[in-house]
Image (spheres, helix red, strand yellow):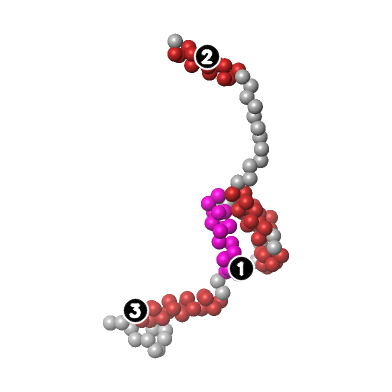
């Protein structure tokens, strides 16, 4: 008896037309991607990309290929990221510190003012 009642309820629910609504849903992911594209469309960013030989269409394709997590991380950090990457001064400082450390540890002898550890 119970099975017959469930079966007739299922048949009835399939036979009744239910209204369907379709709408465009703007998600947070779409807003983050749009924010990235707005930054990439700025004139100074476009000029720097072209100086590097990067096609703007390729950049748009790569932004579209980002996962939702990658797009969220990039959108969150986009204002604090450096425009040109690491400066030459930063690279020189890193190289100096690495050479200094290897001198102190006794692996190299680049600087005459260091004494290797024994």
N-term-proximal mark, 2 vs 1: 2
Distance of label 2 from label 1 (alpha carbons): 66 Å
48 to 11, vertically: above or below: below
Q: Is-magenta flag for residue 77?
A: yes
Q: Is 91 placed above or below 22 here?
A: below
Asked whether residue 55 appears in the rendered view, the answer is no
Disc 1 on helix, strand or loop? loop
Give the residue drawn at x 45%, y 14%. Answer: 3
Question: Left of 6 or right of it: where is 57?
Answer: right
Residue at left offset 44%, top offset 13%: 2
Q: Is residue 63 left or right of residue 93?
A: right
Magenta residues?
68-85
Q: Which mark is residue 105?
A: 3
Q: Which residue is mark 1?
A: 83
Whether residue 79 is visible, yes or no, is yes
Q: Nearer the viewer, residue 53 or 17?
A: 17
- Magenta stretch: includes residue 70: yes
Can you give x and y, in whole percent of width and height, for residue 93 in the image? 49, 78
Reply above or below: 19 against 107. Answer: above
Q: Position of residue 66 (x, y in %)?
A: 57, 52
Mark 2 or 3: the one toward you: 2
> Residue at label 2?
8
Foreground: 75 or 1?
1
């Amino acid at each position: 008896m119970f099975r017959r009642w469930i079966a007739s309820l299922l048949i009835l629910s399939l036979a009744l037309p239910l209204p369907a609504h379709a709408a465009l849903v703007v998600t947070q992911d779409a807003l983050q991607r749009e924010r990235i594209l707005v930054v990439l469309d700025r004139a100074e960013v476009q000029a720097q990309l072209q100086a590097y030989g990067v096609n703007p269409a390729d950049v748009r394709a790569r932004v579209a290929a980002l996962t939702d997590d990658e797009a969220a991380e990039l959108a969150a950090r986009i204002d604090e990221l450096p425009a040109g990457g690491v400066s030459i001064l930063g690279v020189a400082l890193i190289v100096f510190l690495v050479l200094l450390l290897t001198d102190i540890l006794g692996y190299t002898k680049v600087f005459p003012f260091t004494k290797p550890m024994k």
